[in-house]
Amino acid sequence: MSRNITLEQAENIIGACKAEARAVGQPMNIAVVDDSGNLVAFVAMDDTKLIGEDIAQKKALTAVYFHMDTRDLVPLVQPGAALYGIESTTSGRLVVFAGGVLLRRPDGMVAGGVGVSAGTVDEDHQVAEAGRKAFTG
């Protein structure tokens, strides 16, 4: 199967995320998905929170589904906003808070997403962003 993200690229993304997680002092769960939302690679760092495994993968998937970082969904899902309640329509497959980032190829096409979970939402986004930087060079 041909993917927009190779395993080697996913491992590089995860390596950058792990380094950033160590820098912030929080072991993380890190997921990389391709442009179809299929899991390419996942790692749970030692001593991370178990609940984050599922959340990290859902954050990566959500970024791909919406073609945007998950933190940018926050204002759109508040009561009265355009997407209020969207997460309840997908059998719990979406996560609408920070920690999922979209990956784009140099031509602007969606390549996939990175999802990170276990820290604060700001830490999760920071760690995921390190992965995006590793992908985009």
Image (tube, rainbow, N blue to C red):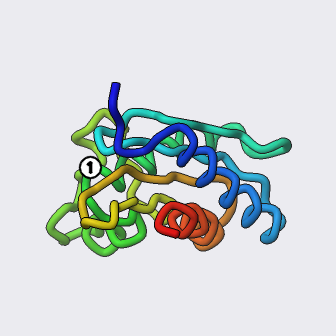
Q: Which x, y percent locates residue 22?
A: 82, 62
Q: Quadrant of residue 120?
A: bottom right
**On the rendered structure, is 50 left or right of 117?**
right
Placement of the N terminus among the 4 image quadrants: top left
Tag count: 1
Q: Nearer the viewer, residue 89 or 71?
A: 71
Residue drawn at 54 percent across, 69 percent down: 133
- Tell me if residue 92 comes above or below residue 98 in the rendering: above
> Which residue carries the number 1 mark?
65
Q: Which x, y percent locates residue 69?
A: 38, 66
Residue drawn at 26 percent across, 49 percent down: 65
Secondary structure at badge 1 equals: helix
Residue drawn at 38 percent across, 42 percent down: 34
**On the rendered structure, is 37 left or right of 24?**
left
Q: Nearer the viewer, residue 132 or 105?
A: 105
Q: Which x, y percent locates residue 16?
A: 67, 60
Q: Quadrant of residue 35?
A: top left
**On the rendered structure, is 108 left or right of 72?**
left
Q: Residue furthest left?
A: 82
Which residue type carries mark 1? Tyr
Residue drawn at 28 percent across, 65 percent down: 77
